Image (spheres, rainbow, N blue to C red):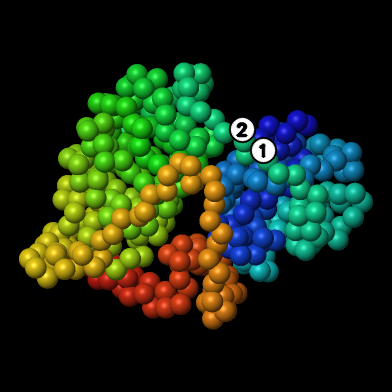
Amino acid sequence: MDIRSDQHRYPFCIVWTPIPLISWLFPFIGHIGIATSKGIIRDFAGSNYVSEDNMAFGWPTLYHQLNPEKVNGGSEAWDNSVAEASDEYKRRLHNLFLDNCHSHVSLALNTMRYDGKSNWNNFRVAADINLHGKFVGFFTMVRISVDVVNDAYQFINPCKQREISLRNLQIPTIENLGVTRDQFDVIDLSDNNIRKLDNLPRLKRLETLLLHNNRVDFISKEIGDQLTKLSTLVLTNNNLAQLGDIDVLAACPRLEYLSLQGNPLTHLPKYRQYVIYKLKNVRVLDYKRIRLAERQAAKKLFKGESGARLKGELVKRSQQISEGDEETEQPPKKRATEEQKKIRELISGAKTLVDVERVQQILQIGEANGTEEQQNGQNGTDVHMEEQ
């Protein structure tokens, strides 16, 4: 029954993780799952889908271990109840307020009659984890070392590339990648805490770098010199905030596939056009093929004096914080009352996980007011481009 947070194993536990940005505004709101006797997490992650060992919104930050002796039938009855609840929710539509991840956990506890009770509900489950939950230790971050690389999953992927997986290790910085001895075509650093894409050794073989779900807000200008064969870069769900932050990628002559979805900069005006203009070798941006008409339109948009003025207005770079300042977080800027009201309306209107992700993206750009119109306008442009 030992908790092994480094391996994401929480036997007989209710587990909780924050929903980005929404949980910052309303700390009692989060995503919940329930683990089997072996510690494997199951959570109702979306309509007709119960995730297994891949918790939505990230790995747990809180856990509360329950006592299997309070279940008639012990561990076997616990696992059967979790499986039964999961099978039931694979047939249900997700509703953020009425039938959600809390409901899934409640059904499991009611099915097993935990502690002799069958009156578990969303509020009781939420109260249980918030009152009795223990924090997962965040100071056990992993540093990339020879041992970490040797213990990591290494395989030949379906594209016949040699790949190493360094996912979900809470790696804070890129370092010591030289210990890979340049033996991999693909390095997967997804689901870590990396903030800067820098400190890269020269890796002549590396073609694909995966950095989903990190905190990257800076890309080193040396990336082109160090990763000479880089053709695919996936930075989905990171913190790149300004168009100028991607200028350094122009130094990657073979870069053809790029994903920046889920970064604040994707909501800026002319985002797609600027990336197409600046990174001339990229063929697929955010999983959409760049068409010739788009490339010509982007070139025309930023051409000449008017184009230079437009770049001056739109293209900025994020201000970098020194390492000493990173440790001292600035107090959050107080939002205006009107903006707070707008945020509450957006959250109240969210009915599914898709709606939650949309609210998250809106909040990431810093302002709630007027973003619906801006997003609708941008989406309309994307549809128009795709149809051409």
Residue positioned 63% across, 51% down in the render:
17
Q: Is residue 201 above or below residue 220?
A: above
Residue positioned 71% across, 38% down in the render:
10
Q: Residues within 10 Å of mark 2 (few under 14, many from 20)?
A: few
Viewer-side residue, 208 vs 308: 308
Residue positioned 87% across, 43% down in the render:
71
Can you say which quadrant of the picture contains the N terminus?
Answer: top right
Residue positioned 50% across, 63% down in the render:
360
**x, y (%) of residue 23?**
62, 60
Q: Is residue 8 above or below residue 179?
A: below
Q: Amino acid at mark 1?
A: Gly
Real-space CA distance between mark 2 and mark 1, rounded to the nearest whole angstrom: 6 Å
Residue 83 visible somewhere in the drawing? no
Instruction: Tell me if label 2 and label 1 are in contact, CB under 8 Å.
Output: yes
- Compared across the picture, whether 309 is left or right of 244 comes to left
**x, y (%) of residue 130?**
76, 54
Instruction: Give the quarter of the image for residue 40.
Output: top right
Q: Amino acid at mark 2?
A: Thr
- Tell me the element at label 2: loop
**x, y (%) of residue 114?**
86, 49
- Tell me the element at label 1: loop
- Compared across the picture, whether 347 is left or right of 323 comes to right
Q: Residues within 10 Å of mark 1 (few under 14, many from 20)?
A: few
Viewer-side residue, 16 vs 245: 245
Mark 1, residue position = 137
Can you say which quadrant of the picture contains the C terminus?
Answer: bottom left
Instruction: Give the quarter of the image for residue 308.
Output: bottom left
Q: Is residue 91 above or below residue 146?
A: below
Residue 189 visible somewhere in the drawing? yes
Mark 2, residue position = 140
- Compared across the picture, whether 70 is left or right of 12 comes to right
Viewer-side residue, 204 vs 215: 215
